Amino acid sequence: MKREFPLFVTAAIGLFMILSFFVPHQAVSVPADFFQQSAVIVVAFGIVLGGANLLRVNLEAVLKRQAGWPYRLVLIAGLLVMVLVGLIEGRDFQAAGTRSTWIYDQVYSPMSSAMFALLAFFIASAAFRAFRIRTPEAGLLALAAFLVMLGRVPLGNALTAWLPEDLRLGSVAEWILRVPQNAANRAILIGAALGVMATGLRVILGIERSYLSGEE
Amino acid sequence: MRQLEGLARLDRRWIFTVTGLLVLIPLLWPLNLPLTPSPPVRAYYDAVAAVPDGSHVLVSCDFDPAARPELEPMTRTTLRQLFAKRCKVVVVVLYPGGARLVDQIVREVATERGALYGTDLVNLGFKAGNEAVMVLMGQSIPNTFPRDQNGLDVGTLPIMRGVRNYSSFPLLVSISTGYPGTKEYVQQVQGRFHIPIAAGVTAVAAPTMYPYLQSGQLLGLLGGMAGAAEYERLMHESGPASRGMDAQSLAHVFVALCIVLGNVAQWGWKRREGA
């Protein structure tokens, strides 16, 4: 019963939600709306559970002095400070001039931007050290990367301004994105969509049970 | 051959230094390289321009400070184009770290353009739930977002009169950095509720949007800072994206050069070892 009941609930709600997509009648759409609203509430609970789990895992690691424990301590401190400040400020925690917004503007925002900005340096370094053209396929990839990288910036167009418009780097980059890249991307999308459908069907039919308690 | 050996052993701090200088110098002394709007950017501009004056437009801003340099300029320019058409802008956020940032951007542009909060603009704030929230908005936006970013009852705001669900909008503008974002709007909303979508995404996500662009599920597409800069050009603006493109141009050329030099150095090294 412990296993059968969740499987039954999953199958019943899964099939009902598929039905609601095709049947617009009130008898179907009203309960479907209720289930969707419930999903939003479950996700909200998930955020709280995720936070609690993060705290538990990292606290354990700090107490056991595992590798990198000082970083985990910073993470715990950050988490607790944000939650405490938010609780003290109550519902207006997002209003201008609060401590929460100060932390967001002065700490979270610049640190988050800085992390992303570092990518430019690592991409340049990786391009020099790791992008090796050893096979014809790698050569083709490098050529496409070369053309798209230069074609997506004004300098590429400026350097090829003397060529007919269709042969300028901007037009070539746009063609690569629109034709070969698009074809490959579409194939991946269709494959992924079929995979999602198959997985969904396996979950509804109770074949895929890993979401229950980690069992295969 | 000795030079090639030196190149192969190049300290990566030199690469970091050159990258930093190539980004910094054009930001201080702009090169003003000419910008040519690409077809997806023109299509985005046309999609926003085709919205009837004074109508409601839903703008979903799903990004956080990490994507700010790429997505903030296009958000600002989009809002300016919409306010110029006296459109009523309804903003939502589905990305957890972005609510405060989006609120700042929206309010700054509204102040600059003289748009009144509650009448010309509302920020409904963040709601957790990803695709579930997108689908719920198709049933009722006031029920999905009963309060705005600052806790005001949306029923009391004049802008929300007549706003029921996606059918109240002639256009959805999705500006996103990842999940949930444009892809999920196309998959969950466009096909089911038949709302036209125009999108702005980060450069790294732009290629994945081309299938939707070609199928007509997206009316137009802004890809990264380049897309934002081309859009600024169409709007006759010289904003942060246009200024940033000089830096990005030089950085791209340097990365391309790094690929060539790295391979030449490797080739020289191998030849020496083989000899």
Image (cartoon, rainbow, N blue to C red):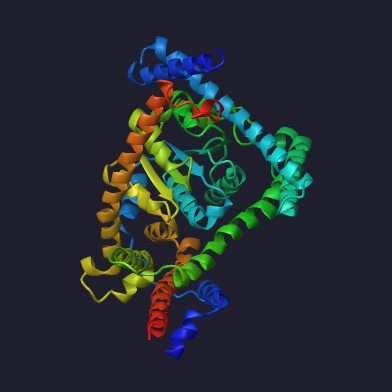
Left/right of residue B252 with respect to residue A60 in the rendered view: left
Q: Which of A162 and B178 is in front in this view?
A: B178
Residue appearing at x 58%, y 25% in the figure: A41
Q: In this view, does B121 lie above or below A137?
A: above
Residue appearing at x 44%, y 71% in the figure: B255
Left/right of residue B17 with respect to residue B235 in the rendered view: right
Q: Is residue A19 above or below residue B183?
A: above
Q: Position of residue B120 (x, y in %)?
A: 51, 39
Q: In which quarter of the image is residue B14?
A: bottom right
Q: Nearer the viewer, residue B241 or B84?
A: B241
Q: Is residue B217 above or below residue B231?
A: above
Q: Is residue A98 visible?
A: no
Residue appearing at x 67%, y 49% in the figure: A104
Q: In which quarter of the image is residue A127?
A: bottom left
Q: Position of residue B239 (x, y in %)?
A: 48, 61
Farthest bottom residue? B2
Q: How many marks?
A: 0
Q: Nearer the viewer, residue B67 or A135?
A: A135
Quadrant the N terminus of chain B occupies: bottom left
Q: Can residue A202 be seen in this view?
A: yes
Q: Where is residue A155 in the image (x, y as percent from the top left)?
A: 37, 72
Quadrant the C terminus of chain B occupies: bottom left
Q: Where is residue B89 in the image (x, y as percent from the top left)?
A: 48, 39
